[in-house]
Image (cartoon, rainbow, N blue to C red):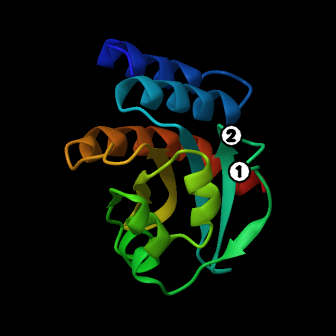
Amino acid sequence: MSNSNPIDLLSAVAHAHDDESQPLATFGAIDSALANAIGHRLFTILVHHRAQRESERIYSNMPQAYPVQGRKAITDSPWMQRVMVQGLPYIGRNAADLREVFFDHELILSLGCRSVLNVPLRWRGQTQGTLNLLHEEGWYHNHHVALATVYAQLALPAVMAHSLEA
C-alpha cells in the first residue's frame, strides 16, 4: 500500500470511464486504486445474474489462478444472503472464516490470502455484483468498508455495461 493521494486515485478511476477499452479500463483503474488505498493480493469482480441464480467472474488480477470465465450457481448460504440479498459487506478476518464461507478456500489460502473484504455493488435496492479483495490475515477492518463501497459504486457503470453486452 502506498500513500497515494485519495483524490488522485478516485480521479484516475473517473477518467478511466472515458477510455474506449471498457470495461477493462475501469476495472484496471479500480484494481490499481484499491491496491494503493486499501491493499490486496487477489482482486476480483463478480457480476450477479439474479434471474439465472448465477454469478460470473468478470475481472481478476490473478487470471492464472482465478480466470475470467463461466458462471457458477448461487446458493442460499449465509454469505450469499448477507452480500447478494441484503447488500451488506462481508469481512473474513482469517483462514477459518474463509474455510467457512468459500468452497475454493484451499486455492485462496495457497495464494497467501487469509482475509477477505466482499463489497456489494448496489443499484436500485439490488446487488449487481461484488468487489472482492483478499489479503494476508487480519488485513481488512470495518473502516475499509466505506472507501471500498465508493470504488464498488464507481465500478457499477462498467459492470452494468458488461452485463448488457454479455
Q: Position of residue 135 (x, y in %)?
A: 45, 43
Front-lying residue, 48 or 18 = 48
| Vertical side of 88 occupied by 149: above or below | above
| In-image side of 16 versus 9 (left or right) | right
Q: Position of residue 24 (x, y in %)?
A: 69, 33
Disc 1: which residue: 66
Q: Which mark is residue 14?
A: none
Q: Secondary structure at mark 2?
A: loop
> Which residue corresponds to the image point at 20% horizontal and 43% vertical from the top-left?
143
Q: Residues within 10 Å of mark 1 (few under 14, many from 20)?
A: some
Q: Amino acid at mark 2?
A: Met
> Which residue corresponds to the image point at 50% horizontal and 48% vertical from the top-left?
113
Q: CA distance from mark 1 to mark 2?
A: 6 Å
Name the quadrant of the N terminus.
Answer: top left
Q: Which mark is residue 62?
A: 2
Front-lying residue, 147 or 3 = 3
Front-lying residue, 65 or 51 = 65
> Which residue corresponds to the image point at 58% horizontal and 49% vertical from the top-left?
45
Tag 1–tag 2 contact (CB < 8 Å): yes
Q: Secondary structure at mark 1?
A: loop
Q: Residues within 10 Å of mark 2 (few under 14, many from 20)?
A: some
Q: Position of residue 35 (x, y in %)?
A: 46, 28
| Vertical side of 83 occupied by 4: above or below | above
The tally of labels here is 2
Q: Amino acid at mark 1?
A: Tyr
Front-lying residue, 21 or 4 = 4
Which image quarter: residue 81?
bottom left
Name the quadrant of the C terminus.
Answer: bottom right
> Which residue corresponds to the image point at 43% horizontal and 45% vertical from the top-left?
152
Q: Position of residue 34 (x, y in %)?
A: 44, 31
